[in-house]
Image: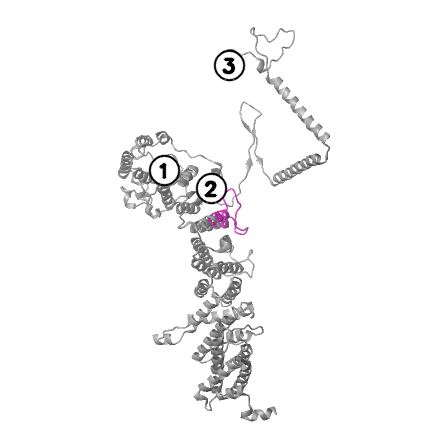
Amino acid sequence: MYGVCGCCGALRPRYKRLVDNIFPEDPEDGLVKANMEKLTFYALSAPEKLDRIGAYLSERLSRDVARHRYGYVCIAMEALDQLLMACHCQSINLFVESFLTMVRKLLEADKPNLQILGTNSFVKFANIEEDTASYHRSYDFFVSRFSEMCHSSYEDPDIRTKIRMAGIRGLQGVVRKTVNDELQANIWDPQHMDKIVPSLLFNLQQEEGIERSPSPETEKEKESPVDLTERCFRELLGRAAYGNIKNAVKPVLMHLDNHSLWESKTFAVRCFKIIMYSIQSQHSHLVIQQLLGHLDANSKNSARVRAGIVEVISEAAVIEASGSIGPTVLEVFNTLLKQLRLSVDYELIGTYDSFANMGSKVIKVHEERQLQESVIKTIGSFANTLPTYQRSEVMLFIIGKIPVPGMYPALGSANTGVEGSRMIQIMLLKSLLQVTAGFQSTNILTALPTSFLDPLLSFTLMEDAEIRLLVLDILISIIDRHDNRQKFSPVRIISDISVLKLKVDKCSRQDNLFMKKHSQRLYRHIYLACKEESSVQRHFESLYTLLGLICVELANEEVVVDLIRLALALQDLALTEEALPVYNRCAVHALSAVYLSLISQLTTVPTFCQHVHEVIESRKKLVPFLLPEDVLIESSKIPEKLENVEVEVLFVQAKIAEMLGGSGYNTERLTTPYIPQITDEDRLSKRKSIGDTVSLQLEMESRNSPEKEQRSTAEQITFETLKQAIVDSVNVEELERERRRQVVERFQTAPFEEIAAHCGARASLLQSKLNQIFEITIRPPPSPSGSVGNGHGRSRSIPVYEMKFPDLCVY
């Protein structure tokens, strides 16, 4: 009976007749629009028939595909698209299942046109917002198939491009359809992201090998695969929530690893620029955190790979200009400093292993040097994105990583030795210099706290010239708050400093407090730095810049007096310190002269300026090698010996004090020569590297002989001594804790009478002690005859309040 009804057209169901009527006799005529409107009206009027319409269309399409009647296939897909666009009823779920079955059928076909047709229909479906949720729909097949199409290797390049673009649009449709639907399988799962992201990156990478020079008309007509891929990739990342960032970024890292794309850097930087600009700004720190973790995972990879990752981190930090790297600010710098240390170890050892095995990979020194420069640059890029308070914390963090002379052991590994410690120290100081570059703080007290200044200044006393120069540059960067640094270079005596256009502001209260607290330490380290025999031209130039900045940025009247005393003390140093090389003595003379010339014009005291000018003119005629124009140049003009410097070419402290005293300056302080105080820090400073150990000695003063002070032999602090001291302190603490416990227990459990008796006994003991003290201190008054008693017995002691005093002694 069912078969008979199928043979008779008049007895067939109405939906089938309506479906058959939309197909013309000749497929080239296309869809019969009038009959399509009837079918659409019927589907809207009887939505319960929609699933049957879809099943019947699917049946016809499968038959037409099998018979290679592709014209009717296109008509069937067009009809399905129109029905999807028109119908949003509750019964559309079953219709969608039929639709997806037909799309799957087309995607499985061998013909590229059918694959593209199915993809276009799926993209249209992806843009439709369904009114009802679906609990059983799966898109796993479409993710796999579209990803496969993105890697198409079809022979014809034009068709291959079309297939790849269809695959990209298909992945874009899958993402749009599933990313906001909580009932669907999570598209952010690794099993899906590991297919989608590499497919997009594969097409994004194709631009490097393709030279495109299309006409303007061609650009308007069609979009290139690379542009489409980038747009799809940005859309995918823009939809990523906080918990999905890692799953989206991890396939990018794996793709760059598998295809060795870190070394070229260009593509890797481009990828992460797209990522950083596409994701939500509050999630940026997650990307950087993953990059840092990936850098740690590649610690033993080649230097070029690590340099590529560091370059990407640097670019990502620049993009994240909001100033917040999330809760991992110090973690970022910790990881980068760790990589810097490892690179130094690799450079000195020669392999990526602790011990040079036969199978170890030999490294290239120049590549490690490039990596170190890249890490330092990246540290600076990160620091520039931070606000002032966070940058101060980073400065403290880095200075805490640098071994301070006499305080921390060597930082290098056992295989690198002293040279490794020195190189790590230099690299960390260079990193600190990058962080301080452009650092401008209104409050110098917060910019240079004691916890930062103390360890930093300790490096100015080391024998390594490069380390001292780095420390001077760091101090200059922090103190220079008005970009005056470049105006002090080159070091020359200028008759009118107004041409320098120095920016001078009145010192704030914080500046005065800072100088009151730390000025003497700064002066002392500057003075001692001039005594270093290994100092060269750049050291004296930096010292002049530092002194000039102190005078411009932080000087009040008291500071100016101290700076003049310091300059005169440097002149005396150059005269008396004959152990210094001749160049250093001439350079110190030149430094003193040029600085007094600067400070005299800043004070605007005419007589002081006149005296300085006269001495400088005398030097130009008699001893030009004591001026910076002849000393602080590449080919200096200095004599073989420096002897018998005449008084007329020297600055006289008494004259300067007299001249400035007339202008209200402290004459007494000016006449007092500056003498730096030698501290324990100076004794510990003369070491060639931070790897040198410091022997701690404890000197005990003996007080047995009142005639002269004697010092016992220094007690050597050993491990056993420290261990015994710790054990003794623990025992004392335990005994004290036990005594307190017994007292508390007694007062909690003992009867009242016992507690009262105990307290009474203590009170009686205290009273007896007081009575003894009073007996000793209270003496009888002297008798008029001068005798204490009559000799027959002991005289009675009279209390003070019973004594009779003369009227003159009472008031």
Considering depth in this image, is 258 or 135 the residue closer to the camera?
135
Tell me, yes or no, if residue 252 can be seen here.
yes
- Percent across and percent down for residue 323 are 44, 54
Question: Of the residues tagged 1 and 3, which is closer to the observer?
Answer: 3
**Could you tell me if the residues under marks 3 and 2 are in contact, i.e. CB atoms within 8 Å?**
no
Instruction: Sort mark 3 into few (<14), some (14-19) or many (20+) by Cα contacts within 10 Å.
Output: few
Q: Amino acid at mark 3?
A: Val
Residue that carries the numbered disc 3 in the rendered image: 810
Tell me, yes or no, if residue 343 can be seen here.
no
Considering depth in this image, is 746 or 753 the residue closer to the camera?
753
Q: Quadrant of residue 460?
A: top left
- Percent across and percent down for residue 131 are 52, 73
In the drawing, what numbered circle is on residue 556?
1
**Could you tell me if the residues under marks 2 and 1 are in contact, i.e. CB atoms within 8 Å?**
no
Q: Is residue 325 magenta?
A: no
* SS label for mark 2: helix
Q: Amino acid at mark 2?
A: Thr
Residue that carries the numbered disc 2 in the rendered image: 450
Whichever of callouts 1 and 3 sits on the residue coming sooner in the sequence is: 1
Number of dots carrying numbers: 3
Whichever of callouts 2 and 1 sits on the residue coming sooner in the sequence is: 2
Instruction: Sort mark 2 into few (<14), some (14-19) or many (20+) by Cα contacts within 10 Å.
Output: some
Q: Which residues are drawn in magenta?
A: 394-423
